[in-house]
């Protein structure tokens, strides 16, 4: 639309320039050329000189032009004008009328004045210029009115539809498509708005279905924890009984199998806990209860999940931490479990005080994580390239980061070529 108005402005400028040129060109023009005036005056003068009576000339002597013949005393003796107003040589000089003298017998017998009708030409010139200006204004006005019509009836509706399509693409379905009454895209825009209503209904159905699915996952996860816990307790009980058995060979073989049962049940327990936590977070029912606890609880958590005995822990500063011990246990358990699963090396754990946080650095010595995946491994269900052929759901580190955020802490990952180092920032009391 800007180009249209720019073209209208250029046209207006050209018309204005043309009007100025027309006015300047016709300013000093006369309807009678100078050479024609001289020929006509000479013909009238010669005809008057030949005739005995200056007032009695041929009808076509002036070639249709008005003229006046004066005698020696200045009296009008021949006047072909429509209006017989007084005229003299002085009048001719003042009005710039062409004139010449009638010579008879080498004497001045009179004067011929050719009436050059400047006023009539001026009126015609003024009318031409006025008509030109009026036509130019009419043309420019028509262009502006047409441009306004195009803008209102076509451009603006298209812009509204463009904005509406952008809102739909970005998921903003609350804004209807506004259109003026009786616009030419009425049915088309109505179809767009019907589509928006259908998308709103579809989104509501989808959200309701997703909520039901999450509720089902949460319910099943919660229900699975009870039998898994029972399996673990049963395995521990049987192992204790066989350790008390006198048949050492049978007890050793059975103990190994029971240990495997316990480990597999523990892995299932971790996965179910992560799935349950993820479902509760999506439902907005994930509860965190941070309380003050001594930092020594961290050592208990590490011992609980260090089933291979490969962790080497430094001294823990004696401070009070403000955290949810149960959720912190889930975080540390997921990190150690991941380390054993993908690195299976010694794990160095160190502690320092940094401002209002207790920093806990958990550093294994495995292959680490490629830099292009480092920011992705905490995403939900993301599993790195090195996870092929290994069990897992891609929820462990995602749950760990979510829990640390909800406990007003943070988690940072660094892969420095000597394994993966995960730092937990645990708030102090």
Image: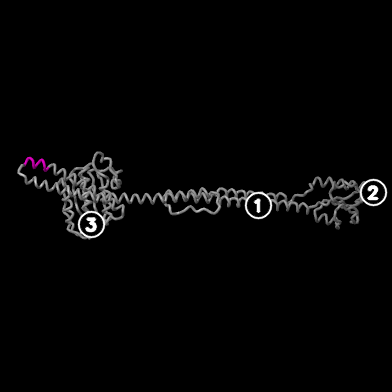
Q: What x and y, as percent, mark residue 61?
A: 88, 46
Q: Upstream in the sequence, badge 2 or badge 3?
A: 2
Q: Residues within 10 Å of mark 2 (few under 14, many from 20)?
A: few
Quadrant of the snapshot with the C terminus: bottom left
Residue beneath disc 3:
324
Q: Compute the Cα span from label 3 to label 1.
A: 81 Å
Q: Are marks 2 and 1 in contact (CB under 8 Å)?
A: no
The single residue placed furthest to the top in the displayed view is: 389
Q: Secondary structure at mark 3?
A: loop
Q: Residues within 10 Å of mark 3 (few under 14, many from 20)?
A: many
* Residue at image location 90% in from the left, 56% down from the top: 75
- In magenta, the rendered stretch is 248-255
> How far is mark 2 from mark 3, CA to CA?
139 Å
Residue 138 circle label: 1
**In front of the other: 277 or 388:** 277
Q: CA distance from mark 2 to mark 1?
A: 60 Å
Q: Main secondary structure of the magenta part?
A: helix
In what element is the residue under mark 2?
loop
Which element is circle 1 on? helix
The dot on residue 19 is: none
Identify the mark nearer the N-term, 3 or 1.
Answer: 1
Q: Farthest residue toward the left?
A: 246
Task: Depth check: give the residue in front, 414 or 276.
Answer: 276
Which comes before the other along the chain, label 2 or label 1?
A: 2
Q: Position of residue 249 (x, y in %)?
A: 7, 40
Number of residues whose C-alpha sits closer than 10 Å to that of mark 1, classed few (under 14), some (14–19) or many (20 or more): few
The verdict on residue 250 being magenta is yes
Q: Are marks 2 and 3 in contact (CB under 8 Å)?
A: no
Q: Which mark is residue 52?
A: 2
In the rendered image, residue 197, in percent from the top left (x then y), is placed at 44, 51
């Amino acid at each position: 639309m800007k180009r249209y108005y720019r073209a209208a402005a250029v046209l207006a400028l050209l018309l204005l320039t043309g009007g100025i040129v027309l006015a300047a060109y016709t300013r000093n023009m006369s309807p009678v050329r100078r050479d024609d005036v001289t020929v006509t005056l000479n013909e009238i003068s010669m005809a008057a000189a030949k005739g005995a009576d200056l007032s009695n000339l041929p009808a076509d002597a002036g070639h249709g032009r008005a003229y006046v013949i004066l005698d020696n005393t200045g009296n009008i003796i021949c006047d072909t004008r429509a209006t017989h107003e007084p005229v003299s040589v002085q009048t001719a000089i003042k009005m710039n009328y062409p004139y010449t003298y009638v010579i008879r017998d080498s004497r001045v017998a009179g004067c011929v004045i050719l009436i050059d009708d400047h006023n009539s030409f001026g009126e015609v010139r003024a009318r031409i210029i006025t008509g030109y200006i009026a036509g130019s204004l009419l043309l420019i006005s028509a262009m502006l009115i047409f441009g306004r019509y195009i803008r209102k009836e076509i451009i603006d509706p298209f812009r509204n539809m463009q904005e509406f399509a952008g809102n739909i693409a970005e998921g903003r379905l609350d804004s209807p498509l506004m259109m003026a009454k009786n616009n030419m895209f009425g049915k088309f825009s109505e179809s767009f708005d019907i589509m928006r209503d259908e998308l709103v209904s579809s989104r509501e159905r989808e959200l309701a279905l997703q909520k039901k699915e999450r509720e089902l996952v949460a319910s099943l996860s919660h229900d699975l924890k009870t039998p898994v816990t029972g399996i673990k307790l049963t395995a521990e009980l049987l192992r204790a009984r066989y350790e008390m058995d006198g048949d050492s060979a049978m007890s050793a073989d059975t103990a190994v199998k029971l240990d495997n049962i316990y480990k597999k049940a523990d892995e299932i327990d971790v996965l179910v806990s992560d799935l349950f936590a993820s479902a509760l977070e999506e439902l907005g029912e994930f509860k965190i209860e941070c309380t003050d606890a001594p930092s020594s609880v961290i050592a208990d958590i590490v011992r609980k999940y260090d089933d291979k005995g490969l962790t080497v822990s430094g001294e823990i500063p004696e401070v009070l931490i403000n955290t949810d011990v149960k959720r912190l246990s889930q975080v540390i358990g997921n990190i150690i479990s991941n380390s054993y699963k993908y690195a299976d090396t010694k794990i160095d754990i160190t502690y320092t005080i940094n401002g209002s946080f207790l920093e806990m650095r958990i550093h294994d010595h495995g292959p680490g994580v490629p830099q292009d995946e480092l920011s992705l491994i905490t995403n939900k269900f993301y599993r790195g390239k090195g996870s092929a052929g290994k069990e897992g759901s891609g929820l462990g580190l995602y749950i760990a980061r979510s829990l640390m955020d909800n406990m007003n802490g943070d988690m940072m990952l660094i892969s420095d070529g000597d394994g993966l180092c995960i730092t937990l920032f645990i708030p102090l009391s």
